Image (cartoon, rainbow, N blue to C red):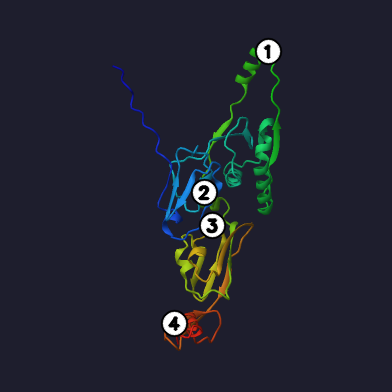
Amino acid sequence: MKRFMNLELPPEPIINSNCVRKRLKNSICDNCAASCPVNAISFSHMDAKIDNELCFQCGNCLFSCPVDAIENIAPHERTYQQGYLVVNHDEPIATTEELIVWHKQYQIRGIQIAEPLVDKWLPTLAALNLKLKTLQEPVWQLRIEQPPVVDSGRRMMLFRQKLDQKPLDKGQVKTGLNARKQFYPEDSWFQISLDSECCILCGACAKVCDENAIQIGDNQFVLDAKRCTGCMSCQVVCFPKSIQVHGHTAKHSEPTVFHYYDAKCHTCHLPFFSWEEGVQTCPICSQHKKQGWL
């Protein structure tokens, strides 16, 4: 009788409960799906799943998830040497978000690519250099490696030369937008805009923001783009649609501060916040009066 060994398969990749799709009914965050080259991530009502049959664990989603909700996927191990990433075989193409971390974590300043693979990597390299220019960082150089000419009469010599070469370094970078914030603490990757004419200062956006990118207190409404990871939860819970989040890279991002006033409604006698001093009717009572309920 043949005996079969019990092999333990690696755990399947999952999206855990930190996912904003699983916490907010109307969440519009789709960063992971947008970065997946094989459409392995799908969404349903308050759920997000990774299809293990399609996923080949390139790790792109790890660098786009705003809440580090993806488990059982490791970032792709890449080779580098003397400040250059070395791409000499067909491997998963890195996203701009991943290369931004390589730039700081390993002080990489260029990429060496085997000639047949150059066209695949050029769009990513171009997008990376645009962001590096915005951040006032050194742009990456491109070094194209020509394929060696093989002389069948000198195969042994070429083999010996290969053995004598210094082996390439290997490494992985930290993942997640919060890791990127640690490397670029004064820079921002998203822009939070507020339409104060529509905002009723209910405070829902500040309560739902896990990163404290929105803070309301002491008569100040503060938007700090450096803290934002682009989950867009604030945009989802804002029913007047007065707050918007957009991808935007900025150097030395400074918080935007709006000032508001304490007030008390003469109709319902409840305290509320107002953008203008001396307002006597809260937004709810104002709306009820427009609808003829008061």
Mark earlier in primary sequence (4, 3): 3
Please state which amino acid type lies under the numbered disc 1: Ser
Q: Which residue is mark 3?
A: 230
Residue 56, horizontal then vertical, whole percent: 50, 37
Of mark 4 and mark 1, the one earlier in the sequence is 1
Mark 4 and 1 residues: CB-CB less than 8 Å, in contact?
Answer: no
What is the spatial separation of the Cα atoms under label 2 and label 3, in whole angstroms?
12 Å
Q: Which residue is mark 4?
A: 271
* Vertical position of residue 159 compared to residue 212: above or below: above
The span from disc 2 to disc 1 (Cα, nearest Å) is 47 Å
Q: Nearer the viewer, residue 210 or 237?
A: 237
Above/below status of 260 relative to 212: below
* Residue farthest top in this picture: 153
Q: Which residue is located at x 53 percent, y 37 percent?
A: 76
27 relative to 194 in the view: left or right: left
Q: Which residue has dot 2 on it?
A: 32
Say whether disc 3 or disc 1 marks the residue closer to the N-terminus: 1
Mark nearer the N terminus (2 vs 1): 2
Q: Which quarter of the rendered picture does the C terminus lie within?
A: bottom left
Numbered disc 3: secondary structure: loop
Q: What kind of residue is marked 4?
A: Pro
Location of mark 1 (residue):
152
Which of pointers 2 and 1 indicates the residue nearer the eye? 2
Question: Image point 50% across, 50% down: which residue?
Answer: 65
Q: Is residue 278 above or below residue 179?
A: below
Q: Secondary structure at mark 2?
A: helix
Secondary structure state at the residue bearing disc 4: strand
